[in-house]
Image (cartoon, grey):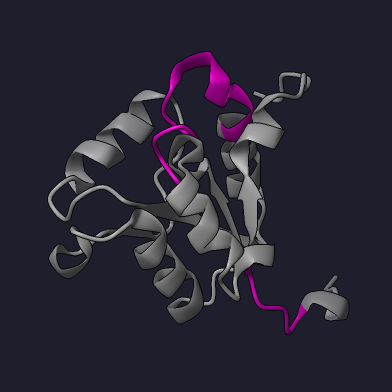
Amino acid sequence: MKNEQFETYSKIKISFDLDGVLYGGKDTKNTRALYKILHRDQFTEVGILTGHSHDSEKWDIETILSYGLPAPDFYFRRTPEYMDRNRAVYKSMIIKRENIDLHIDDYDYDYSETIKIFNNSDIEQKILRAKAFNNKDLPNNE
């Protein structure tokens, strides 16, 4: 039976940072679990938005897979023209350009300049601080 309520939905687009969010030991277990859970949902598109350099995609995808996580639906990494600027400048531009609904980030390990850039942007409400999420004790949803 067709569910007409969901016939004309648009997927929720969610991006995850890598370092401090999906990479980084036990402090990233909850964000890894969230990435995995969201990937199962037919109403989400889940991917990566990282400050890594333009030549790191292959290594990043292999690392994601090595954690037992699914491959991302999309992958954005800093391009050469943004390498000399704070990562938040590039990420803010991509969040706007690609219509990302929610971005999960560690704010470059709480770097004050990154916090200021995100807080002063018009996309601030779209960014979830991973630190707040990873400090919770959640059930294991593997």
Q: Is residue 28 above or below residue 54?
A: above
**Quadrant (top left, top right, bottom left, bottom right) of the N terminus:** bottom right
Q: Nearer the viewer, residue 118 or 29?
A: 118
Q: Is residue 132 magenta?
A: no
Hey, which residue is sitting farthest bottom in the picture? 8
**Quadrant (top left, top right, bottom left, bottom right) of the C terminus:** top right
Q: Is residue 46 left or right of residue 87?
A: right
Residue 82: image x %, image y %?
Answer: 22, 65
Residue 94: image x %, image y %?
Answer: 41, 71
**Residue in the image at 46% along x and 32% along y:** 20
Residue 95: image x %, image y %?
Answer: 49, 70
Residue range in magenta is 7-31
Residue 19: image x %, image y %?
Answer: 39, 35
Asked which quadrant contains residue 122, the reply is bottom right
Hey, which residue is sitting farthest top in the picture? 26
Q: Is residue 27 magenta?
A: yes
Q: Is residue 16 left or right of residue 86?
A: right
Q: Is residue 58 visible?
A: yes
**Residue in the image at 58% along x and 47% along y:** 39
**Residue in the image at 63% along x and 65% along y:** 124
Q: Is residue 83 left or right of residue 17?
A: left
